[in-house]
């Protein structure tokens, strides 16, 4: 599976992650699936609802999931997955990520070290929930791929 | 009671690609069990070891969160709609 992402959207995710540092940021990935994978067409930055532990936890409440999904459908888009940051930690899913993940969604993680965005990687939970498989990110030139 | 369970997008591949499933049940717990019995691959995405609903699985009956009702014992009536809605959570490996 390939997740296609324009340079503009990549920079928006990295900017959100940098602005949120040293806390985790989060947001939704909207777009469409096609024969070649998934095309991310827009983002919805969200407020991290884990006010008690924002340095290493993020939460999107169900009412926000409903709202974002409804807004995506109104635009003819699909809620493809979620992005979040790992401040001073690698762009790899943690055990906590795995325990709380949903199948099907793309989980894009960006590592931020000393307020600088670093590696970005995307992941999909396996059907048996045992691990994440890496999802290739195809960077695209131009604003919307 | 004849009720409809709305399936969120991430679980549809495990429910025959359906966005909703009709089940017969008297309580929310029975409905989710009926759903998971029909589509066994759903079970471990909905329930943790020990059979409890995973913390990030939110269930609504007619748009009311079952945590504000009688949880899995919430009674159902003909025509009720049950919605399964994700919370999205994660973070790095450091302890809270």
Image (cartoon, helix red, strand yellow):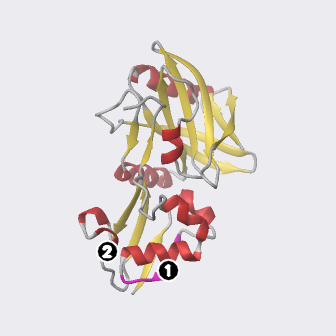
Q: Quadrant of the N terminus of chain B?
A: bottom left
Q: Which residue lies furthest to the right in this view?
A: A36
The disc at residue B22 is 1
Q: Where is residue A138 in the image (x, y as percent from the top left)?
A: 70, 32
Q: Where is residue B24 in the image (x, y as percent from the top left)?
A: 45, 85
Q: Mark 1 lies on which chain?
A: B
B78 relative to B48, above or below: below
A34 relative to A141, above or below: below
Q: Residues within 10 Å of mark 1 (few under 14, many from 20)?
A: some
Q: Residue furthest left?
A: B68
Highlighted range, magenta? B20-26
Q: Is label 1 on the same chain as label 2?
A: yes
Q: Residue at x 58, y 63 (%)?
A: B12
Q: In which quarter of the image is the C terminus of chain B?
A: top left
- Residue at the disc numbered 2: B73
Q: Nearer the viewer, residue B61 or A54?
A: A54
């Amino acid at each position: 599976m390939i997740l296609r992402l324009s340079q503009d959207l990549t920079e928006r995710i990295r900017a959100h992650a940098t602005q949120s540092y040293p806390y985790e940021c989060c947001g939704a990935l909207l777009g469409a699936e096609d024969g070649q994978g998934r095309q991310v067409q827009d983002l919805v930055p969200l407020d991290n609802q884990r006010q008690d532990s924002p340095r290493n936890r993020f939460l999107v409440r169900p009412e926000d999931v409903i709202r974002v999904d409804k807004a995506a459908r109104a635009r003819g888009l699909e809620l493809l997955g979620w992005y979040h940051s790992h401040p001073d930690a690698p762009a790899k899913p943690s055990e906590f990520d795995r325990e709380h993940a949903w199948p099907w969604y793309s989980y894009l993680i960006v590592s931020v070290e000393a307020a600088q965005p670093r590696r970005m990687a995307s992941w999909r939970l396996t059907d048996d929930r045992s691990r994440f498989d890496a999802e290739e990110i195809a960077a695209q030139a131009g604003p919307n791929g | 009671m004849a009720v409809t369970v709305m399936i969120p997008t991430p679980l549809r591949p495990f429910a025959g690609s359906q966005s909703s499933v009709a089940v017969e049940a008297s309580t929310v717990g029975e409905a989710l069990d009926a759903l998971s019995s029909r589509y066994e691959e759903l079970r471990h995405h909905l329930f943790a070891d020990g059979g409890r609903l995973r913390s990030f699985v939110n269930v609504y009956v007619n748009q009311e969160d079952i945590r504000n009702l009688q949880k899995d014992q919430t009674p159902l009536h003909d025509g009720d709609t049950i919605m399964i809605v994700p919370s999205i959570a994660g973070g790095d490996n450091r302890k809270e």
